[in-house]
Amino acid sequence: MAKLAILEFPDERLRTKAKAVQSVDDEVRKLVDDMLETMYDAQGIGLAATQVDVHRRVVVMDVSDDNSQPLVLINPSYTPIGDEKEPLSEGCLSIPEHYAEVPRYLKVELKALDRNGEPYTLEADGLLAHCIQHEYDHLEGVLFVDYLSSLKRDRIRKKMEKRHKQMQGA
């Protein structure tokens, strides 16, 4: 396994729409393993392949307290269950140290392939439902800052650009 570099906002590669995985093979399974290692190392709860500059429809997540329930979503899709939404404070490994309330559906039905290419369906609510929607957005080239006002988004962009300059100078 290998730790992957996570792209950070405002990197334009984060805006790339991911392509469907045609077959789940050893290359895809290695990507999944590397993404899980990267996500756990960064202390995140979700990671989309887009965030590691691989533009395929692959997501890993684990919302458990002890990193014991990894979930693999290959070619995921979801359907809201009901119309009810709730805001939840969201962060993102591609936008470190920034958080914002984003309204998401309370419950969703997820359809995806697992690590072995087997289809499954899952009903999710709470944090898992939020995480599914957040990571799915990454596959579409959408970031949580896109739900904010342009003023807040620009403020975060400027702080991230400053952070990148400081890191390059270090």
Image: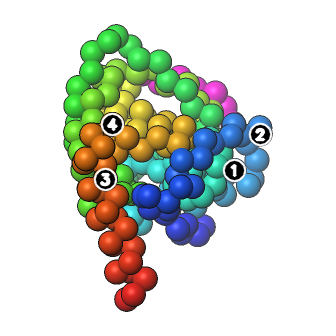
Tell me whether circle 1 and circle 4 mark residues in contact (CB < 8 Å): no
What residue sits right under mark 2 in the picture? 23
Q: Which mark is residue 60?
A: none
Q: Residues within 10 Å of mark 4 (few under 14, many from 20)?
A: some
User: Residue 164: percent from the left, percent from the top?
Assistant: 39, 73
Viewer-proximal residue among 168 and 51: 168
Q: Nearer the viewer, mark 1 or mark 3?
A: 3
Indicate the quadrant where residue 39 lies: bottom left
* Highlighted range, magenta: 117-123
- The Cα atoms of the two marked residues, 1 and 2, are separated by 8 Å
Amino acid bearing label 4 = Tyr
Residue at the (31%, 63%) spot, across then down? 158
Amino acid bearing label 2 = Ser
- Closer to the chain start, of discs 2 and 4, is 2
What residue sits right under mark 4 in the picture? 147
- The Cα atoms of the two marked residues, 1 and 4, are separated by 31 Å
What residue sits right under mark 3 in the picture? 154
Q: Residues within 10 Å of mark 1 (few under 14, many from 20)?
A: some
- Closer to the chain start, of discs 3 and 2, is 2
- The Cα atoms of the two marked residues, 3 and 4, are separated by 12 Å
Q: Secondary structure at mark 2?
A: loop
Amino acid bearing label 1 = Val
- The Cα atoms of the two marked residues, 2 and 4, are separated by 33 Å
What residue sits right under mark 1 in the picture? 28
Amino acid bearing label 3 = Asp
Is 92 on the left-hand or right-hand side of 76? left
Is residue 72 visible from the viewing direction of this image? no
